[in-house]
């Protein structure tokens, strides 16, 4: 259990409740603080969400512009392409939805936090390409070394 992260979440929940703000994302973060096995659950939830988003197959058109558009449409964070080839897409999310409201100085995570987004983007690319994809968060803003979250999506080739 990450006690520091949990305390940060609880304090922010208290503040937001007093101000009449939503705390849904904070509840999810508090669950994450209770154990790392939730990474797989968040990845799965993100992947499943991709199934209900309206996405067209893009076999003949570029994937990256579609991901940029989806990121904007659903307020997932600013999609910034780092590298792309037939086998993978590496990108940054500036103001990543899962961690944008957390204070880095108090939380500082040893590993990534945004497995929900990893699963979501893997599912989106899977839906676009018809290929079983996998995504992983390479760097997270909450690790305190970068100002963004970086992800890589692996696209298998036959």
Image (cartoon, grey):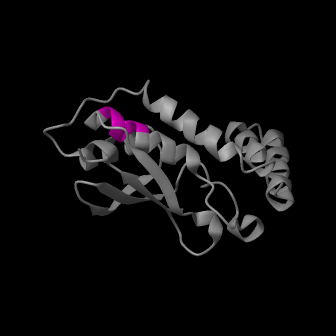
- Residue at image position (49%, 30%) is 49
| Residue 22 visible in image | no
Task: Examine the structure image and report whether residue 115 is included in the region drawn in magenta.
Answer: no
Residue in front for this viewpoint, 144 or 36: 36
Q: Is residue 112 above or below residue 37?
A: below
Q: Is residue 24 above or below residue 85?
A: above
Left or right: where 16 falls relative to 72: right
| Residue 5 visible in image | yes
- Residue at image position (57%, 63%) is 140
Residue 43 horizontal/vertical position (percent): 56, 41
| Quadrant in the picture for the C terminus | top left
Q: Give the main secondary structure of the magenta stretch.
A: helix
Residue 132 horizontal/vertical position (percent): 37, 38
| Quadrant in the picture for the N terminus | bottom right
Left or right: where 32 falls relative to 154: right
Q: Is residue 112 above or below residue 69?
A: below
- Residue at image position (23%, 58%) is 85
Residue 131 horizontal/vertical position (percent): 31, 37
Q: Which residues are magenta?
A: 123-127
**Residue sitting farthest toward the left:** 60
Which quadrant of the figure has residue 8? bottom right
Residue in front for this viewpoint, 27 or 151: 151
- Residue at image position (43%, 46%) is 134
Residue 12 horizontal/vertical position (percent): 79, 51
């Amino acid at each position: 259990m990450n006690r520091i992260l949990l305390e940060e979440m609880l304090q922010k929940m208290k503040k937001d409740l007093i101000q009449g703000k939503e705390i849904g994302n904070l509840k999810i973060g508090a669950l994450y603080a209770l154990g790392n096995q939730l990474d797989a659950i968040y990845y799965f939830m993100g992947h499943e969400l991709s199934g209900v988003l309206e996405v067209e197959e893009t076999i003949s058109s570029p994937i990256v512009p579609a991901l940029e558009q989806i990121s904007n449409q659903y307020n997932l964070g600013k999609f910034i392409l780092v590298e792309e080839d037939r086998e993978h897409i590496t990108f940054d999310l500036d103001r990543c939805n899962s961690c944008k409201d957390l204070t880095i100085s108090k939380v500082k995570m040893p590993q990534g936090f945004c497995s929900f987004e990893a699963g979501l983007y893997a599912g989106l690319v899977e839906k676009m390409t018809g290929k079983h994809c996998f995504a992983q968060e390479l760097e997270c803003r909450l690790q305190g070394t970068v100002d963004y979250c970086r992800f890589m999506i692996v696209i298998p080739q036959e």
